[in-house]
Amino acid sequence: MQNPTIILSEAQIAFFQREGYLAIPAITTPEEVERLIGIYDHLFAIKAGREEGNQYDLAGTDEDDKEAAVPQIVHPSKYAQELANILYWVNARAIAAQLLGPQVEMQSDHAIMKPPGSGAPTPWHQDEAYWRPDLEHSALTIWMPLQEATLENGCMQFIPGSHTLEVLPHHSIGHDPRVHGLEVDTVEAAHAVACPLPAGGATIHHCRTLHYTGPNRTDKPRRAYILNFAAPTKKREVARDFYWQAMRQTARDERRRKAGIVSTSGGRLREESK
Ligand code: NI
């Protein structure tokens, strides 16, 4: 295992705690980013994980004969073991430990791609809205683009300070229960901050920070490789009602049932975090 090459400064830690997000210009080497692009594109090309519901359309209806609006792979490292324990993971874990404490553990990795010239927006949401309502979550997400991320191709945007809010009511994107992705019911986005990044840079956001990415208006894919980290969860005294989770009926869940991975459409696993 490699040693981390990044340590956040006190000022960066304070910024994250105050604003609920942080952007850093580099979380790994350009060489690693180059190598990841080939692995990443291959996994989408072979539809890795599709059968068991680990590759699906985050923003569309996910029909087999339809091009995905925003294709996503959950746990891409299950399908390409050379992703595991790369420098990006090592640095991300070190950052997560600085921000959430030494007991932090990586929960999942995700690849979210916005195809050239299309790619719907990923509407405003809080990641915790996807997770189990009966647990107390202390978690964050690290988002790394494999090419420059800009306003034109869908860089991350955040609402500063929104991590101090409770989990707000959400609904399926476009109020279509066939869509996996969630969207917050109401948002005041006038003070949103966009975070353009170079390839191999990263944003870090808390699990309640409202965030958004725009469509990809360029002629190249917008690739993001995302890691989730969490401190151990605790049972909440009073479970919340995340009714929007039970309202979804997605083709992805149907595939998961067929593959014997989930038996009900009720409380979702933390790992399905985007
Ligand atoms: Ni998210």
Image: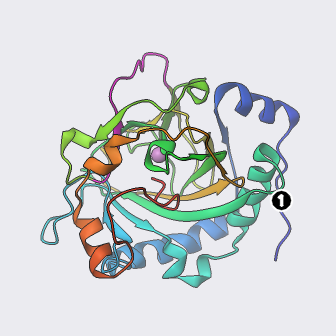
Q: Is residue 208 above or below residue 91?
A: above
Place of residue 196 in the rendered image (x, y in percent of width and height, measured from the top left): 53, 38
Q: Who is closer to the viewer here, 126 or 31?
A: 126
155 lies above or below 106: above
Residue 54 picture location, percent across and down: 39, 71
Classify residue 106 by image quadrant.
Answer: bottom right
In-image side of 218 versus 6 (left or right): left
- The residue that mark 1 highlights is 5
Residue kind at label 1, given as amino acid type: Thr
The mark tally for this picture is 1
Q: Position of residue 9 (x, y in %)?
A: 86, 38
Q: Which residues are magenta?
A: 180-192
Which residue is at a point 60% across and 76% down the rendered structure image?
83
Q: Residue at x 75, y 65 (%)?
A: 90
Q: Which residue is depicted at the point 14% across and 65% down?
A: 66
Q: Residue furthest front?
A: 237
Q: Is mark 1 within 8 Å of ligand 1?
A: no
* Prevailing SS of the magenta stretch: loop
Kindly tell me whether residue 202 is visible in this rendering. Answer: no
- Can residue 256 be seen here? yes
Locate the N terminus by quadrant.
bottom right
- Please say whether residue 184 is one of the residues in the magenta stretch: yes
Q: Residues within 10 Å of mark 1 (few under 14, many from 20)?
A: few
From the viewer's perspective, is 225 left or right of 183?
right
